[in-house]
Amino acid sequence: MISREFALDITGMHCANCARGIERGVGQLPGVSEAAVNFATAKLRVVGDASSVDEAAVVAKVAALGYGATPAAEGRGQEEDPNAIAAERQRRETVAAAVFALPVAALHMAGFHHGGGLGLQFLLATSLQATIGRAFYVGAYRALANGSANMDVLVALGTTAAWSFSVAVMALPGRFPGENVFFETSALLLFFIKLGKYLEALARGKASQALRALLTLSPEVAHRIEPDGAKKDVPVTALAIGDRLWVRPGEKVPTDGVVEEGHSVVDESFVTGESMPAEKGPGSEVTGATVNQHGAFVMRATRVGRDTLLAQIVRLVEDAQARRAPIERFADRVSAVFVPAVVALSAATFICWYFLFPQTAAGHSALLFAATAATAVLVIACPCALGLATPTAILVGSGAGLSRGILLKNPEALEKIARIDLVLLDKTGTLTAGKPRAVNMVPAEGFVQRRLLELAVSAETVSNHPLARAIVELGATQGMAGSAVDAVQERAGHGVVCRLGGVELAAGSARLMRDCGVDPSALDAAAEAEARLGRTSVFVAFEGRLAGLVAVADPVKPEASEAIGWLRRLGIEAAMLTGDNERVAGAIAGALGIASFRAGLLPADKLAAVDQYRSSGRVVAMVGDGINDAAALARADVGIAIGSGSQVAREAGEIVLVKDDLRDVCRAIELGRATLRTVKQNLFLSLAYNALGIPLAAGVLYPWTHHLLPPEFAALAMALSSLSVVGNALRLRRMWA
């Protein structure tokens, strides 16, 4: 079977349940093996048999489900963010709901139950029900049409029952003597739930922003070498395989290819995450969007457009987010059983009191008695407390985290991080500082450390290589500016040769020393010892003699060891993933006490590692700071980005450590566990309230008490249950203040 894959842009979704409904509906089409909706980017990815999967049929199916679908546009990074548009729409609707609902509540509390005040309540509540409430009716219809019941169904039922009963009392005062209306119940319910939708829109994953940030990495223009040798600036989108391109110092490499002429040093941290640049010469592969630091070179394009590594990473991030199972709140899962049960109980209550025991309503209209009890069941079962149980606790926990420098872009990450049992850590920029520093000096015979450093600073001042800058910075801390040198020759990938006071001075690799006629073997043992610690040795020679070596490394962050120990105390395993070589990775892991690590990984390898751990049953958090970590951050159960890292990593992760303190990973886990405990307590309170309130509303105790719970009391009980849930959640803020 030949597999086919395509993507569609979806319109009309307003919640994760919409996405799940589309997945189920499209997944039932013949030949479709996989249908995944990325709610954050409003994109549907379909995989299936090329001979039977018809794109038009998928579009028609999506339309039949009540949504829109069009072929996915390429390169959407420059368009206006659809998430921002959705959040702004939710904000406007929330403001509109407040304009209608708050006056209704004020009139009701002021006692305007008759005349013009009652008429105004009716007009405002009806307008709100017909406008803002429409979305919940549509959502309820779609859920029921797809064979499920969600929070929209409960909201639609509860608000309709409250509004309908009030209209009946208002229109037929003779049939409902002495009854009060409660338009404010339906109005306030719509307002509060719409407010929650707005907060959810603000907090949603922001995956589209991560993809947009990735797309801006690629340069817009390339210098193409024409057949006649002339250089012509052309859009990167116009490049073809085989084009010869000229890349100047300081520019981004326009596309993937192979160097044909010239030597340079390229910053490939975008790909590998490593701070050390890579040496490039004829035959070396280069990657689009990496930065050429030194020297111009000519390259031949081997991959362009959607086939480049950057485009592949974009797809990896997008696919990782789309494949991740949507977070189903406990309330939504309960709703699948709870909604039909409540409807059945309400109907059974009416039938029982009106048809089976009409005489029980002694002195009352049997119809009024039965309708009052049935309505009270629907109102008291309305899902305020159940709906608030999880998001309220999570939002309070999110606020507490923010006060500690732990930014949760998706508040539900708190619920997920509480369950993790494995933390995967990137090395460079996460466990280490991410910037080379000179950490040790070993002088050769006849030299002292200060003289060695003076010579090294003098030679390296003329270079922009990261290793050279690290040595110059060390000299600056000791008041050394370096002596003036001349006849400078910077040999790409090897070091610098110059003259100081007419005498040759060289700083660089062991190979450079030998090229200058200097034997570096006297310090071979020292260089090997530094290499075992993950450090790079820069040899220095003066007057034809070996002066010593300066060791440069990406040092471990001071708090990293404490953070690893803290994770162990929390019962969580730590493992390291890095693009660096095995020796450096082993040195860092050994110094921090990390038993498991994987080295030499590309972005796809990190993603595969996350998948492997998750498929074995582990609940995984990924901590990283680089573009190369973005896909793994998105695929992990929880992605945690270092605040000083790349924008793409910050957008792909669900949690951002603003203070760049690795110990905040542990604090986030502890906060998540405390939040999850609060969520469970809230769910217990809300379910216990329904377990007690629904029988009371149905009139189970009426034969003994001779009192029926009025719908307005049911509404008050509903409000009190919500207050208890909110109050319990606020305890979390006090604990983490």
Image: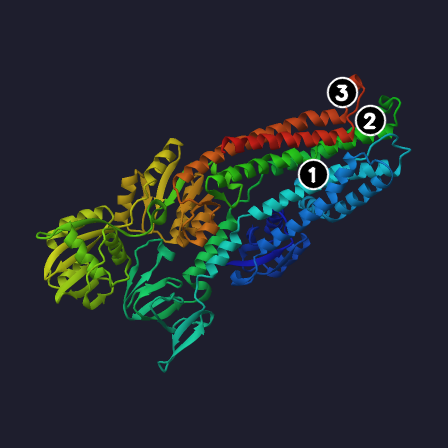
Give the residue number, with chain letter if any, for mark 1. Answer: 154
Label 1 amino acid?
Leu
Residue placed furthest toward the right: 174
Residues 242 and 89: in front is: 89
Q: Residue at x 53, y 39 (%)?
A: 399
Q: Would residue 16 be seen by someone viewing this image from the given angle?
A: no
Separation of residues labelled 3 and 2 (CA atoms)? 13 Å
Q: Residue at x 34, y 40 (%)?
A: 559
Give the residue number, with chain letter if any, for mark 3. Answer: 701
Marks 3 and 2, the one that precedes in the sequence: 2
- The nearer-to-camera label among 3 and 2 is 3
- Above or below, comparing residue 736 to residue 63 in the picture: above
Separation of residues labelled 1 and 3 (CA atoms)? 25 Å
Q: Would residue 96 be seen by someone viewing this image from the given angle?
A: yes
Give the residue number, with chain letter if any, for mark 2. Answer: 353
Mark 3 touches mark 2? (CB < 8 Å): no
- The nearer-to-camera label among 2 and 1 is 1
Label 3 amino acid?
Leu
Residue placed furthest toward the top: 704
Mark 2 touches mark 1? (CB < 8 Å): no
Q: Residue at x 28, y 44 (%)?
A: 588
Marks 1 and 3, the one that precedes in the sequence: 1
